Amino acid sequence: MNKNNGQQAGYFRQKTRYWFSEAITRQQGLVLLAAWIGWVFDSMDSTIYAMVMPSSLQDLLGYSASKADVASRGGIILAIFLVGWALGGTLFGTLADYFGRSRTLAISILFYAVFTGVAALSQSWEQLALFRFLTALGIGGEWAAGSALVAESFADQDRSKVLSFMQSAWGAGFFLAAIVNLLIVPWATGHQFTPWRAVLMIGIFPALFAAFVREKVSEPEKWLLIQKERENLKLLGNQPEGASKNLTVLTLKQIFWPELRRDTIVGTLLAFSATFGLWAVTNWTPTFVEELLRVHQTSEDIISNYKSYAIMALNIGAILGYVLFGPLADRIGRKPTFLFFFLGSILLAPYIFYNVTNYATLLLLLPVLGFFNNGIFSGFPIYLAELYPTRLRATGQGFCFNFGRILAATGPLLTGFLVNSFGSYAKAVAAVSLIYIVGIITLIWARETKGKPLPD
């Protein structure tokens, strides 16, 4: 290290020692930056589609398509997206355990960025569904690799705080998506481009960040030690039979061994409850805003802007929830904190979507809803990392957090079905928000991991 780099590293450590139990190194800072920005772009690529979903499907289905047609196709695409997210999280999580967190993180970012951009070229709703599925594979993988990378790179005393900060990137990504929508839609309209295609095309830019991750971010010491043990076993001829042929099956069996089975089931059900609630409730916020404003015959441009403002309002509260979950979990415990966020979600979501008929009131309440039903997701990188040993951490985290999405994929389908039955997004969303009861009941069997080090 040359003199200037040494001075920069020293300055960096001096600045961070006030926030952490010990001064963090430059490499730790790069790890956190990579995972945070990767998750920002993850969120942006997920959210920009939600914001253009009605217009994209109306365009692809034809403007004679009914609201029910758009809702049903939208529900199918969201369900397919969640299945892809689940499969990607499980697949890339396994790859991260065997081939490295940093390497897998870079590949997953490249994957979701490219296919978000490619989705802009869709000529049918079926093509759009396929490209969203492929995008989701990378999005699921980014979280599994990134959360394991961060969890293993920091001291036990700082883990909750750092992972809460990492999860806050999802809220920042929402803001970025809203800004993209505000800027790109008017620009595309003025330049004779199809607005929804222009918005999705922006999603390809995170691909450039993948090169930075691969070049600058090293693997955590915990994973390197496990990898060295694997290599030694292989040299001695003790490699588990079939390991090189079917890594995913091998590791998935291990997270269901007796000592981990209960944790895997509990983690999956908690993630399912939160994810079902997010995608069956919050993800329909832009569509709910559109329904609310069309009653007043508001113009398309104003509706587009108001959707962006609603997303921003939701995520003011979400970012606060993400950041505060970790310190609260350190203070009162993981289980009580999950309970607090589940209760807030189940009380607020039905009230807002069923009773609010005024846009100004909606803007005031969305930050509170975002605090609870988005903020709860900071609990998963914290809690799931504490359930699994290093050799299985990314696999276990990736499976629990993402397999719950396969179950949660029924959420958008159910919401789309209920829209047809009730004739209203508001009533449909209010009904499906009762899913949070499942999470509350699951906490009965959850282990408390407050104050415990990561299992080796």
Image: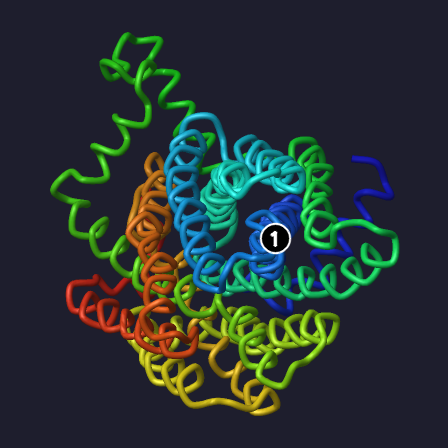
- Residue 257 lies in quadrant: top left
What's under tag 1, amino acid-wise? Ser
- Residue 339 lies in quadrant: bottom left
The residue closer to the viewer here, 166 or 233, is: 166
In the rendered image, which quarter contains the N terminus? top right
Residue behind mark 1: 56
Residue 279 left/right relative to 295: left
Residue 24 seen from this side? no
The residue closer to the viewer here, 28 or 245, is: 245
The residue closer to the viewer here, 270 or 57, is: 57
* Residue 62 at x, y percent in the picture: 59, 51
Residue 128 drawn above or below residue 351: above
Residue found 43% across the figure and 73% down from its top: 425
* Residue 267 at x, y percent in the picture: 27, 55
Residue found 56% across the figure and 35% down from its top: 102
The residue closer to the viewer here, 150 or 146, is: 146
Residue found 30% across the figure and 58% down from its top: 272
